[in-house]
Amino acid sequence: MPVTIGQTIGTDNRYQIVRKLGWGHFSTVWLCEDLTEGQTYYAIKIVKSANSFKTVALDEIKLLRCVKDQEPAAVGYNKIVLYHDYFVASSLYGEHLCLTFELMGPSLLHLIVQSNYQGLEQEGVKNIIQQILLGLLYLHDKCKIIHTDIKPENILISVKEPYIRNMVAHVNRFNELGVQMPKSYVNAAGWNEPELFEQTCDEASTSNVIYPQRVDPRMTSCPNKAFVNDFSKSIKIKQDNRPVSPLFVDPSIQVKIADLGNSCWENHHFAEVIQTLQYRALEVIIESEYSFPADIWSVACLAFELSTGDFLFNPQASEHLSCSEDHLGLIWELLNGIPPYIAHSGRRSSEYFTSSGTLKRISPENMKIWKVEDVLVDKYQWKRVDAILLADFIESLIEPDQDLRATASLALTKKWLDTIDRH
Ligand code: ADP
Ligand code: MG
């Protein structure tokens, strides 16, 4: 839908568009002021008009309604981005479902980029992972919903009043000066386009903000400068102006799970293959049955990525191997093998595994068993005591047998999380 800044949408023109916040496959998300209340802001997700998107959005609305109404007093309820309502808007292209949400800040991906891919300090990581597990506890146990797309881009940071005021003031300044707003605030183009990125860097260079040199292709939103400034202050900077040690994160940081656009019910799935590649569980790769444990696998990937700045698994297709084969090889190396009864449990198992349960196209001599603990010590120079704790947490969340894998409630009791410094 062609959206212009300042236009009003919704019943009785209730909402006024302030700026774009981000976009995804199905939608663009806009910062809007609620004119009936004044200075109250929401994030409105405007879904593309094609029928296929509408169908998906109607499913998302059913899931969101369940999350909203199931048990507001339950633990973890406030760890899912709050959905309010929806309305329909018409454009030249047809009808668009518009979903209103509580306004959130940037995603965890921004923290990873801000850390210059060095990761965050452990206290921050534990704090964030604990909140995600509480959100999943609610989704899984109370709502019987599998999120299916837990990844840094879908975990958003809560923002407070001054941040929102600053964001609105920042947009108003463009109007007052009569200068064009950055394209990333307006429409179509996004932050990951090189010329926009340079523009953002220019802006940043006048305010001591350290931006990474490379553009992360996963980036689909441009955060508020105030946010970036706050977090940049705590980055330790070396001579070349790039952070070299883990990013300090304010211990009072609050995060929530967003984007139920791909979610499904425990007993009603919408797709056979779920999850973004790097966060995809073993059972999904081999097309075995999947359920809540698939989300838990993704949490392990996220805990590692937040701690180190790198993917836990980053499979690549090559001349000799498909992406899934490479992925299974990486899992095998990290877990020191996959039990044959698990290897053989998927619809695609015979494509990847021999009858004795070894990988068909990767010979044992070409594999290097490298346990999480040793990866942290050897590759990231962690102290052994710290590596043992995180490795134990990660391994119980990527247990190949789903029935033995930690649940959200069990993961919350793991020793690694025990040592959270609560302020
Ligand atoms: P899609 O289903 O199309 O992927 P998402 O729900 O993931 O859409 O939203 C797309 C992007 O919009 C997100 O990555 C995020 O940057 C931004 N966004 C989504 N919801 C909010 C919100 N409540 N507050 C602020 N930004 C949001
Ligand atoms: Mg998304």
Image (cartoon, helix red, strand yellow):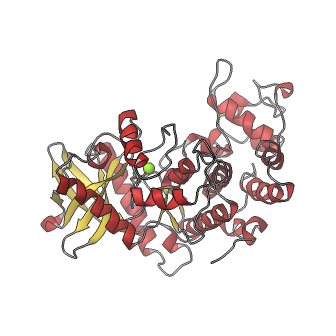
Is residue 349 in view?
yes
Q: Position of residue 129 (x, y in %)?
A: 63, 62
Whether residue 258 can be seen here = no
Q: Is residue 11 above or below residue 210?
A: below
> Residue at point 71% right, 36% down?
328
**Residue 405 spot, x, y in % from top left:** 73, 57
Q: Quadrant of the C terminus?
A: bottom right
Kindly indicate the quadrant of the structure image that contains residue 193.
top left
Q: Position of residue 190 (x, y in %)?
A: 36, 41
For this orientation, the residue located farthest to the bottom is 73
Residue drawn at (40%, 56%) of the image: 225
Horizontal side, residue 46 vs residue 388: left or right: left
Q: Splitting the image into 4 quarters, where does residue 391 fall?
A: bottom right
- The foreground one among 183 and 147 is 183
Q: Is residue 36 left or right of residue 57?
A: left
Is 419 or 95 nearer to us in this picture? 419
- 133 sits left or right of 92 in the view: right
Q: Position of residue 383 (x, y in %)?
A: 83, 54
Please identify the residue farthest to the top as the structure is shown: 319
- Where is residue 165, by image quadrant? bottom left
Q: Please say if 103 is above or below 383.
A: below
Q: Is residue 142 above or below residue 265?
A: below
